[in-house]
Image (cartoon, rainbow, N blue to C red):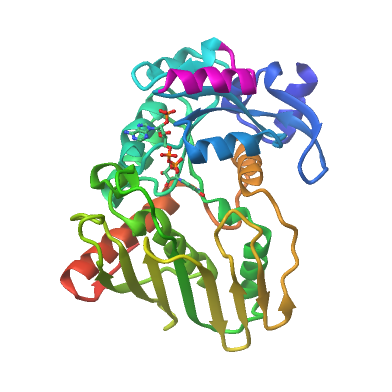
Amino acid sequence: MNSRRDFLQKLGISTLALHLAPVSGWANTKNHDNQAYDGPVLRVAIMGLGSYGTRVAEAMQACTKAKLVGVISGTPSKIKEWQTKYSIPEKNCYNYNNFDDIKSNPDIDAVYVITPNGLHHDQVIRVAKAGKHAICEKPMAVNAMEGQEMVDACKKANVKLLVGYRMHFEPKTLEVIRMRKAGDLGKILFFQGLCGFTIGDPTQWRLNKQLAGGGSIMDIGIYAINGARYMTGEEPVWVTAQETKTDPVKFKEGVDETIQFQFGFPSGAAASCLSTYTMNNLDRFFLNGEKGFAELQPSTGYGPIMGRTNKGELNQPVTVHQTVQMDEMAAIIFHNKQPVVPIDGEEAVKDLKIIDAIYLAAKTGKKVEIRL
Ligand code: NDP
């Protein structure tokens, strides 16, 4: 224990982190980059065992700094299945009524909320009140006000709030950001982000205003919004937006089908983006500067991400996004590691402020100022 404490002290880890990482949560293994790892392991409970939760759980099997140790679900049969598959003990299984009891479970460090968007706010605040770090899926909330309340609650409880912005760790994305910062593209002039897919089942929660908070912008357009920010390295100062609805039965009041939006940035650069639930083959980022360009297509899918710049093909390694994300989140929580692009609650509130502004611009037809 003493050598472990010395090791932690050398790394500058707080006593809180020490408290969160008992000997059982300690690794001495190689990670997905084949690098040796001897440090604390982030013990995670996943809330919401749906399609993305299942993907995260699979990916976490290759993590070395994070481990799936618990579940929170409204479906007992899924809990049983996951318990068997991932050796999850009964004492780490909760439902939506009793998960506040996680407060007295020393074997869980963080809860990853992967439920419908409209539930994130209350669930993350309950996680914070239980004294556990909160990891939340995008969109973190359904508007900026709720997002800010989540940030405040986590601050008050002295826990971290991180958001599942998996692209912030993707190697080709990071290479474009590096090139832009190094000046390889020159002064940035323009960004285009196209994000969409054709959505199926009209009864799913993604098409329910209460649970989704909106439509395509909340789910997929957020990638273009967030991408416009990390690709240009600037925050937008105004937005204009136009909404098109071809099927008002499937896409009810408050659920956007297609929105095109444009940003202006302080440097004078502009962005033009499309978010839709009625077109496939839309997953493309294009960044244009005075000296060069970068293109990612696909740009935000699960991979492989592909891209090229004026200098040629991007050939950085293909990664499993969720594996890297969870290992990096462990390093952020335990070692206060600073990611190249932030993934904290404040970063998510910026996206939510922009989403609020896009909806306002689409509704009023006016240019809306953005203050982040
Ligand atoms: P799913 O519908 O596949 O799963 C959601 C799960 O949430 C359900 O299976 C259920 O799990 C739980 N749940 C709790 N309450 C409800 C409710 N009222 N209605 C429906 N489900 C409920 O959705 P996804 O997994 O695709 O999406 C979940 C979140 O993850 C969303 O916020 C989404 O935006 C985000 N996401 C992020 C992605 C990324 O790449 N970062 C990709 C896909 C989604 P249980 O039965 O265990 O209670």
Q: Residue at x 35, y 58 (%)?
A: 216
The question of residue 86 being in magenta is answered with yes
Quadrant holding the C terminus: bottom left
Q: How many marks?
A: 0
Q: Position of residue 90 (x, y in %)?
A: 54, 11
Q: Quadrant of ligand 1?
A: top left
Residue 366 position within the rendered picture, expressed as x and y whole percent measured from the top left: 20, 75
**Coordinates of residue 76 in the picture (x, y in percent):** 44, 18
Look at the image and give the residue range highlighted in magenta.
Answer: 75-89
Q: Residue at x 67, y 78 (%)?
A: 309
With 354 as the anchor, is 251 left or right in this view? left
On the image, the x and y values in percent for residue 100 come to 38, 19
Looking at the image, can residue 251 be seen?
A: yes
Q: 44 or 125: which is nearer to us?
A: 44
> Is residue 359 magenta-colored?
no
| Residue that appears at 31% across and 55% down | 215
Q: Residue furthest top?
A: 91
Nearest the eye: 247 or 165 = 247
Main SS, magenta region, reads helix
Quadrant location of the N terminus in the rendered image: top right
Residue found at the far bottom of this picture: 290
Query: Do we see residue 334 in this rendering?
Result: no
Instruction: Tell me which corner region of the image, top left, top right, bottom left or bottom right, holds residue 137.
Output: top left
Residue at figure coordinates x 30%, y 41% from the top left: 118
Q: Nearer the viewer, residue 62 or 78?
A: 78
Q: Is residue 261 left or right of residue 328?
A: left
Asked whether 368 or 346 is in front, the reply is 368
Above or below, comparing residue 88 to residue 208 in the picture: above
